[in-house]
Amino acid sequence: MSEALSTVQQRKAREAEARRTHIFAVVKALIKKGGAGEVTIRRVAHEAGFSTTVVYSLFKDKATLITRAMDDDLLALVGAMRTAATAGSNPVERLRLAGQAYVQFGLQHPDEYALVFMEPRPHTPVDAAEVEHGNAEQDPYAFAYSLMQAAAAEDEATVHLMAHIFWQGLHGMVSLGLVMGKDPWFPSIAPQTNVDALMDVLLAGLGQRFRFGASA
């Protein structure tokens, strides 16, 4: 009997996961179509072919639904950053490689990047996400901060400032690339040339302003 119950429970878990995956796809499609304002529990339920009761049983509100829809994208981004950083021989080089991977991920996954970092949306408490806030294995910012901390000889608040500056530079390149694209009014620069120069400027600037890298 217990084995039969276990099989039923596993089937129900698979069905629930399939429903969540389908709902996330609907949420992303709605946001891509018209922004977060397009997302309501009722609209998502209708587009996904479920009752509102089913959607509410999985997500307590719209903000949680949107937050959970971003989890896989955050994990994919931090995975790309972590993989790239392993090739670095020192903290600064690992930071450079992680930054390059961030830019590459953003430019190659425009819809996912825009959802996470460029779409105004309702926010939820950090524990509403399945991605663990502050866990460097899951949270892209926490990973970037850990790399910065290893490369700098500054207090915690200053390292956060440094990580913010680093992130702002990376996001600036990605967001500009996604928004301007091939706009003829804006001079085009090869992405690799651009990101290499950006990393040189960011890392050199951090070394000038803070105890970082060789100056630490």
Image: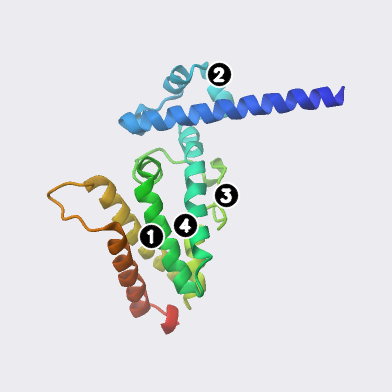
- The amino acid type found where label 2 is placed reads Thr
In space, the residues marked 4 and 2 are separated at their CA atoms by 35 Å
Q: CB under 8 Å between callouts 3 and 4?
A: no
Question: Farthest residue in the left direction?
Answer: 185
Residue 106 location in percent, x, y? 37, 50
Q: From the viewer's side, name the closer residue of 7 and 172.
A: 7
What residue sits 30% from the left and 66% below the top?
Answer: 198
Compare residues 70 and 186 and report the one nearer the observer. Answer: 186
- Occupied quadrant, residue 14: top right
Q: Earlier in the sequence, mark 4 or mark 2?
A: 2
For badge 1, the amino acid type reads Trp
Disc sitting over residue 132 in the figure: 3
Q: Quadrant of residue 99?
A: bottom left
Q: Can residue 156 be seen by looking at this rendering?
A: no
> Where is mark 1, residue-wise?
167
Q: Is residue 61 above or below residue 106?
A: above
The local secondary structure at tag 1 comes to helix
Name above or below for residue 143 compared with residue 74. Answer: below
Q: Nearer the viewer, residue 207 or 199?
A: 199
Do the CB atoms of the residues marked 1 and 4 lie less than 8 Å apart?
yes
Return the mark for residue 117.
none
Which image quadrant: the C terminus?
bottom left
Residue at the extreme right of the image, as rendered: 1
**Against 118, is 13 above or below?**
above
Count neighbours of disc 3 (C-alpha within 10 A) and say few if under 14, some if 14 to 19, many if 20 or more. some
